[in-house]
Amino acid sequence: MLKISNVSKKFGGIHALEGVCLTLEKGKIWSIIGPNGAGKTTLFNLITGTIPADSGKIEFMGEDITYMKPHEICRKGIARTYQQKNLFPNLSVFDNVIAGMLKDSIEEQGRKKKVYEILKFLGLEEVEKETVSSLPPLDCKLVELGRALATDPKLILLDELIGGLITTETEKICKIVETLRDKGYTIFQIGHEIRPIMKTSNWIFVLDEGRKIAEGLPEEIRNNKDVHEVYLE
Ligand SMILES: Nc1ncnc2c1ncn2[C@@H]1O[C@H](COP(=O)(O)OP(=O)(O)OP(=O)(O)O)[C@@H](O)[C@H]1O
Ligand SMILES: [Mg+2]
């Protein structure tokens, strides 16, 4: 579904990504872990077209998207959530979610129906009229996910959606992510909290200083010496 070949990105003297290659198949939960500054968010920025790659190639469903614009990539079926909260703080939950749908030409009633379906799935119906700035962190994360779902994606990139929450909230997010996978979405997530990442992922990539240092099943990553050295200890 997504093929990243030899992708590199420099910011001044910093090699944020160096010759990264990854392949994601459809319908699974793929994760990237790695220390702060490893290049994880930069990779998502390259995939979604927010920042251009210096070199390399990114293909989505067989099509070269390396230098496409963010809105074109979104239309192709890639949506994302952000590490830093990136919502319209003064708009309601409903309006934040429908914002993801504005690229669609479907009529008003159809759009509203779709938003309500998403809010119901995420358990946000009761707060649909609340202003986002008044919401607790878990609900904000769910609204970000709702807006991503509103774009009708095939592949969803989640930048630390799991993270910064209490255990029961993390479990709730993990369940939602697994349900999305079971519905046929492909998930590519970045995470710092190793336990939920190990539990939910079908496959894990490990980045360190812009390079992929390992990939494998959660068990293989847990027992990988190089990964322990840079990250798990
Ligand atoms: N727009 C930018 N301009 C300059 N430097 C950047 C930019 N974006 C990222 N960097 C640098 O590139 C490197 C990789 O950053 P990135 O945000 O991708 O790391 P990360 O793995 O997501 O880290 P974290 O776990 O802290 O979120 C860092 O050294 C960072 O300071
Ligand atoms: Mg990051």
Image (cartoon, rainbow, N blue to C red):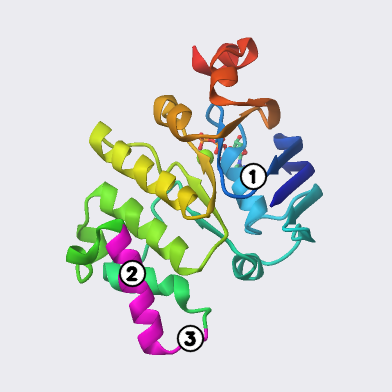
Is residue 89 visible in the rendered image? The answer is no
Q: Please tell me whether residue 82 belongs to the stretch shown in magenta.
A: no
Magenta extent: 105-121
Helix, strand or loop at label 1? It is: helix
- Amino acid residing under circle 1: Leu
Q: Is residue 161 left or right of residue 8?
A: left
Helix, strand or loop at label 2? It is: helix
Does 95 appear above or below 64?
below
Residue at (33%, 54%) from the top-left corner? 142
Helix, strand or loop at label 3? It is: loop
Is residue 156 visible in the rendered image? The answer is yes
Q: From mark 2 to mark 3, how far is it between C-alphas?
A: 15 Å
Residue 43 location, x and y as percent?
Answer: 64, 44
- Amino acid residing under circle 2: Glu
Tell me, for residue 117, which label it has, or none.
Answer: 2
Tell me, for residue 106, which label it has, or none.
Answer: 3
Tell me, for residue 158, which label it has, or none.
Answer: none
Q: From mark 1 to mark 2, how far is it between C-alphas?
A: 31 Å
For this orientation, the residue located farthest to the left is 126
Does 149 appear above or below 182?
below
- Amino acid residing under circle 3: Ile
Residue 83 location, x and y as percent?
Answer: 45, 46
Q: Is residue 102 left or right of residue 169?
A: right
Q: Nearer the viewer, mark 3 or mark 1?
A: 3
Residue hosting label 1: 43
Residue 101 location, x and y as percent?
Answer: 46, 75
